[in-house]
Amino acid sequence: MTRHTLLLFSLFTLGACGNRSTPPPAADADVDTDADTDADTDADTDADADADADTDADTDADTDVDTDADTDSDTASECVAPLLRCGEDCADFETDPLHCGACDAACGDGAACEGGVCRCAGAECLTGESCVDGACVCERILCDTACADTTSDEAHCGECGVRCRGECVSGVCACDPPFERCEGVVGFCTDTSADPTNCGACGESCAFGEYCQDGECVCRPGFGFCEAWGDCRNLSDPRQCGDCDTNCRTICDGGTCLADGESCSEGSEECSRLGGSERWCADLQTDHQNCGACNRACVGLELCVGGACHGWELALGCDECPCDTCAPDSICCAYPGDDLLAICVEAEECPG
């Protein structure tokens, strides 16, 4: 091939290559790549930002709820022993002068709370007294072991020792119906349907051997009315053993004439009078005509309890025992032989 021919072939080949399509320039590729990268980065950043926001919100909400709940629980908690709750305070009843022995039981100025009792300069003040300048002072009326307001104190109404069996109003015992106010009655108020000293009306007193039932004086249990005598008689007496017409020539034991040679039942003693011509059995612990010893009789309406004579009064307002209207030195009992009548006996035990 000649040199001229080779030159023409080379030119033809070069021209053909110049007409081919070419890929996008490298600069364009760099721009697209950067744009994609930025978009991805922004998307990730936004996602992270959202995640952070959610996390903060959850954390704040949880913190607020837990904190409030804990605070409420602490406020409502009980006081730690030996403290007790008094309103919003936790108090030690043994030593707290504002709550001495009980809530709001405040000791006066200069008084200390010791063992749940207000003491003034080391001394224990009486009920109703206040501590003034280190000394116990009664600014009312001193009645035995109490500083009393006699205008309203039911244990000292009007004057010391007058115990109301109702409410004390302006120094006078007031009685609630159906009870009546009778002068001379302990506590003034009484029930005239059952009071043997005011039976049916004030001042109407029952006789020996009687008691008051439904406003009328009737023979007390163990007694019977004997026309020959005109009064109620003990039916354990040999002169009327069991009934008014039986004169026992042996021993009368609880209303029964014993046969010759028989002795008193267990728990009873044989008593006699008139040189032994009249004999009977008696429980010296409960027999009010032989109380503690043969022929030692109680006076009036007294009852024999434990071999000693004791007074009594109605358990006002109570049909049965226990009854909180009885005085502190009395005990609620059923009247001997009548379980439906509650009485207050001035003794440590009930009559048998």
Image: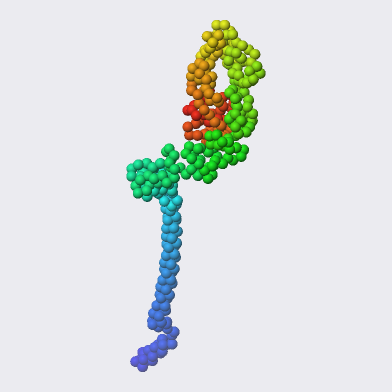
Q: If the image is split into quadrants, where does the N terminus sit?
A: bottom left
Find residue 253 and report its horizontal and vertical position in percent: 57, 13
Find residue 15 and report its horizontal and vertical position in percent: 41, 89
Q: Residue furthest right?
A: 227
Say how many tags the image has.
0
- Depth order, front residue of 217/24: 217
| Above or below 170: residue 34 | below
Residue at left offset 43%, top offset 44%? 128
- Residue 180 sits in which quadrant? top right
Residue at left offset 50%, top offset 44%? 151
Residue at left offset 58%, top offset 15%? 237
Find residue 308 and report its horizontal and vertical position in percent: 48, 23
Find residue 130 and report its horizontal and vertical position in percent: 40, 46
Residue at left offset 38%, top offset 47%? 131
Residue 92 visible in the displayed image: no
- Depth order, front residue of 121/35: 121
- Depth order, front residue of 173/89: 173
Q: How is the image coloured?
A: rainbow
| Above or below 232: residue 137 | below
